[in-house]
Image (tube, rainbow, N blue to C red):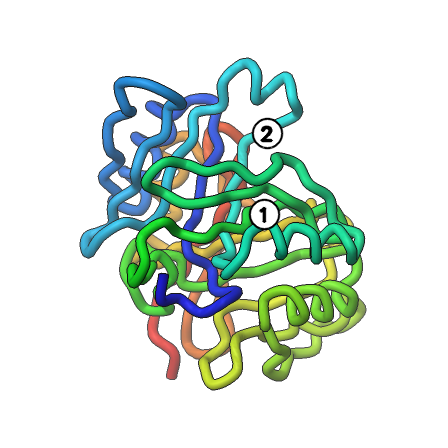
Amino acid sequence: MTNRQGEIIWYELMTRDADKAAGFYGAVIGWQVGAPPSGGPDYRMIAAPDGNAGGMLQLDAEMLAAGATPGWLAYFGVDDVDARVAAIVAEGGKVLVPAWDAAGVGRIAMVTDPQGIPFYVMRGATEGATSTVYQRRGMAHVGWNELLTPDAEAALGFYHRQFGLTRMGGMPMGELGEYSFIGHDGGAPIGAIMPCPPEAKPGWGFYFRVDDVDAARGRVEAAGGMVVMAPMDVPGGERALQAVDPDGAVFGLVSGVEA
C-alpha cells in the first residue's frame, strides 16, 4: 500500500441491523451500500460518489455475546501488523481480536489504546494501492477524526509514537483543556484529540461531509436518528453536528469550506 504508516485507511460501522443502517445513512449522507456477500460474515461496502467510504459489519450473535456494540471504528494502516500490535501492548494497550489474514484484503487486528479505546491496525494485501476513504473535502467521506479520551496528553504521546500523529497547535476549551489538532509531518491536520467531557463516552468519532449540515439535521431526525449536538459554527467557516443513528452509533456531520 502507498499510504504512509499511521494513516487511517478504512472506516467501519458495526451495527445490529445492516439493512436499517443502510437505509438510514443512505437517506442522511447519500451513500450506496452494497449487498452482503453470499458466504461468510455479513460485510457490506459503503460507496460515496467517487468510491469507497468504508464498510458495514452486521454484528452476529457470537460478536454480541463477546461484547461487541454498535459504533464506528477506524483502521490505521501499518507496515507490520504483528510488530505494531506488540508495540501497542507494550505501551498498555490490549488485543481485542488477534491478528488474522483476510483473503484479498490484508492482515488485521483489533486493539485498544492504553485508555481502552478500540481501533484496528491493518496492512492491505494489494501493494501500491492507496486508500482515499479519508478526504478533508470529499463529499460523503470522513472529513475530520476526533478522539475523546480520559487522558489527552497520554493519548497524544501514544498516537504519535505508534502512528506518527503530531500535535499541530490547538484551541483552548476552558475547563475541558485544549482541543489539540493532529496530523502527520508535512501534512494538514486530519483531526483532533481532546479531553472527554463528563457526559460523553470516550472513543474515536468521525465527521462525514454533507452539502448542508442544517438541512441534514432534518434528514437525521426523519430517518429515525437523534441529533445530540445541534448544528454549530466551528473554526474555519464550517458547521458541524453530532448525532446517534437508530442503533445507537454516534457520528458527526460537517459542511462548509474553511475560510
Q: Secondary structure at mark 1?
A: strand
Is 96 in front, or is 56?
Answer: 96
Q: Quadrant of residue 165?
A: bottom right
In three-dimensional space, the C-alpha distance between marks 1 and 2, rounded to whole angstroms, equals: 13 Å
Badge 2 amino acid? Thr
Could you tell me the amino acid type at mark 1? Phe
Determine the residue positioned at 52% across, 82% down.
185
Decide: marks 1, 2 in contact (CB < 8 A)?
no
Relative to 67, is 93 above or below?
Answer: below
Q: Which mark is residue 54?
A: none
Q: Residue under label 2, please give it.
A: 69
Location of residue 72 in the rendering, given as x and y in whole percent from the top left corner: 51, 43
Placement of the N terminus among the 4 image quadrants: bottom left
Residue 68, placed above or below residue 186: above
Residue in the image at 61% along x and 35% along y? 97
Task: Locate the C terminus and report the quarter of the image it occupies.
Answer: bottom left
Residue nearest the observer in this picture, 148 or 102 = 102
Quarter of the rendering containing residue 94: top right
Q: Which of the pair 125/191 is nearer the observer?
A: 125
Question: Residue at point 60% right, 50% down?
Answer: 82
Given this view, does label 1 or label 2 mark the residue nearer the observer?
1
| First reached walking from the N terminus: tag 1 or tag 2 | 2
Residue 110 in the image: state x and y as whole percent: 59, 41
Which residue carries the number 1 mark? Answer: 119
Position of 6 compared to 154: left or right? left
Q: Could you tell me residue 170's position as x and y percent?
A: 64, 80
What's the residue at 30%, 41% (across, down)? Answer: 46
Q: Residues within 10 Å of mark 2 (few under 14, many from 20)?
A: some
Depth check: give the residue in front, 126 or 131: 126
| Residue 213 in sight | no
Element at label 2: loop
